[in-house]
Image: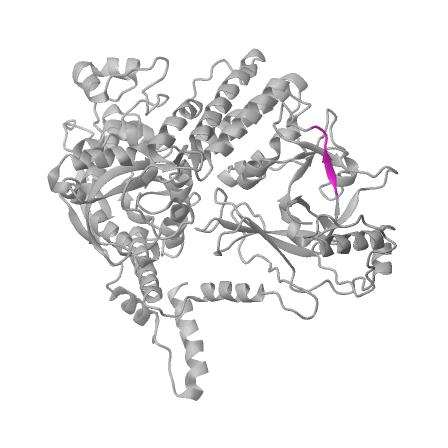
Amino acid sequence: MSAGQIDTLLDLWAATLIQYDDSPPFASHRDLYDTIDSMPLGDVAWESFSMSYKGVKPAENVPPWMKATYEVWFRDPRLLIHNILANPDFDGEIEYTPYRDYDDNNQRCFKKIFSSDWAWTQADKIAEDPEMHGSTFVPLIVGSDKTTVSVATGHTEYHPLYLSIGNVFNSVQCAHRNSLVLVGFLMIPTTTKEHADDVDFRNFRRQLFHSSLANIFKSLKKNMTTPDVVCCPDGHYRRVIYGLGPYIADYPEQVLLSGIVTGWCPKCLNNRNAVDEHTNLLVQELQHKQLWYEYGIVGDVMPFTNDFARADIHELLSLDLLHQIIKGTFKDHLIDWVGEYLEHMHGLRHFPEGRGFSQWTGNDSKALMKVYLPAIRGHVPQDIIRAFSAFLDFCYIVRCEALTEDDLVQLQDALDCFHQYREVFKTTGVRLTFSLPHQHSLQHYARMIRLFGAPNSLCSSITESKHIKAVKEPWCHSSRYKALGQMLLTNQRLDKIAAAHSDFEARGHPQSLSDDDDDDDDEALIMPQEPPIQIQVNEPHHQTTEGEAVDIINRPTVEAHVELAAKPISGGACDVPTLTLALGLPEFPALIQQFLYDQLHLNNHEHAAFDPATAPAFMGRVVIYSSAAASFYAPSDLSSTGGMRREHIRATTSWRGGPAQNDYVFISMNDECAVVQWFSYVTDSHDPDTGMYIVTPSTNDNGTPDVSIIHIDCIFRAAHLIPVYGNNFIPREITLHNSHNMFRAFYINKYADHHAFEIG
């Protein structure tokens, strides 16, 4: 909100208080800003240091970058960590001791950083020094990524640096709470076009980057070997030892961090042949030219981690689900390869109904993942389908919130199958080689999961989401002139407000309006006794970045729970005969009898067989609901810190003035009131190519649809069915609204989300 808007709001507020002889708490926007600036909570001042080129300069025509001074703004990471650790919001959601986790089958389970091998090994190394005994290990999670805030007006770029700690739970990291903070802005050196490819300039950029990181984190260096005393979320003081932990970065940033040549692997230094020698030894023993061409190492730069204890950048570079798997292997490789195959083999070039993307986002790629496989089956070779199926299995397994040893075996099996079937792209002439960094990185996932736990909390999507609040929105609210200083102040004020909010809640002050809204929802969901049972389902207040109608709810963890809408539809049928005609189900009265009979004998397993002549008949009023909400435990998907997620299930003759919407659902058979049409499995096993079950609408012996009435508690969650399209092209008359009636077989889409993958 701009200063002018704040003043207008305060004036309106003041006008409403005149009759009470009162005034707002702030006189103007300046008064509000001064109050925020005076708050001590969350206050970490911005600092800066300057760097410039100190090497040999030419006698004439000195390049501009050699004469420039580069100013780096940052905040003391040690004080930022103190604020994170002191945040009472994280009480009960933070760990102090590495451990090894096992499931009920005595299998090792990898979830959080503190359950990983790396944290365990770090604790062993720390314990070797008696002076550090009794200290809590606090690993830093660091991330940096360039982002563009303006393309049309000067291509303005920033290079923010973020910081978190590995002690907080993965669910807190994924929920984008205040565990990830802005540390500083790294410089992006520029020069004239004629000097852009100069070797000295490229080396200077690398050295500036590493020197800046080393200087920013130098305040932590002492306490990597000597304990620091800090206040923790539970209010207790502890001795802590810091250490550099996973570094979140995309591939260009990883190349810069690890000091390798583009195209090589920052983990194993593998391009054509793997090498085992350590980078430092290679730099000492070999010439720069040999390092560059034979080992892919930039010999002029040593990683900043060399200045810190127990740190190896090649080990600490984290997995990157967004760029390595979703955008990289899936979108940039496999999707493009299929397009090339179709163009080469079938001459397909133009898709008149297709969507044009100027730039694919991660959410665009995730949405395409859900539906792509059935769409191409019948138009590409079987091996391409199996390659996609294996890759999607790999993708969905690795994105789970926790992985066991069995999961890692399945992960490796999926990767082996993918490597086997992707050879079809060579045999069809689409690809000559698979020497691609993103695809090569897949072979490191099993090892890295053992080292650092589930990778969903170390993905670059977390830092990219932070760009919005830390960089893009502050830039938009600035004057655009010398915007960085205004952005620094905005971030400092936002951190203070967040810290004050946490402090108020810890002291028992009323929660925010957004929290009150959630509480109102909870109360509205209570089931009244009269009239007939009604349970409210609320339209989602927030939509996910994928645009789905899904709510993130903070509630006790349950496997699944379904609630009907708050109000029935208006003008609907009110008696059984009318509803029988509306549904076109002559057997509807008998179905009600069967349902009531089953409900009356739920606990009597030896009751007599159902007899319509003696079973109770329902003659009362019928209330129709067009929607319900299914709440279920899905921690691997976008959910609350407790892992709960809510989606809406609809059965309506018209959705927002358009065609009808009738959703599919998974049914839990633990209990046997909704009218449903049943589907049956074509075979008892998954389709061998797509890995998905195929179902078809069930019919009775006389050919009529198999329809039943079930208890609402039997509904587990919504299901996503995709037609088995076959080998022919789809007529344009078929839409998503009538496809159910146009096709006779459907895939149960296990790639709709991670929860569907687990149960499908």
Q: Viewer-proximal residue, 39 or 343?
A: 39
Residue 723 x, y percent position in the rendering: 71, 34
- Please indicate, yes or no, whether residue 662 appears anywhere in the rendered image: yes
Q: Toward which corner of the image does residue 677 lie, by quadrant?
A: top right
Q: What residue is rendered at 87% in x and 55% in y? A: 581
Question: Which residues are drawn in magenta?
Answer: 678-683
Figure check: 495 above or below 172: below
Q: Viewer-proximal residue, 699 or 433?
A: 699
Q: Toward which corner of the image does residue 342 lie, by quadrant?
A: top right
Q: Quarter of the image containing the C terminus? A: top right
Residue 375 x, y percent position in the rendering: 66, 30
124 inside magenta stretch:
no
- Please indicate, yes or no, whether residue 357 appears anywhere in the rendered image: no
Figure check: 539 above or below 636: below
681 inside magenta stretch:
yes
Most distant residue in the front direction: 606
Figure check: 143 above or below 26: above
Residue 598 x, y percent position in the rendering: 74, 52
Q: Viewer-proximal residue, 513 or 525?
A: 525
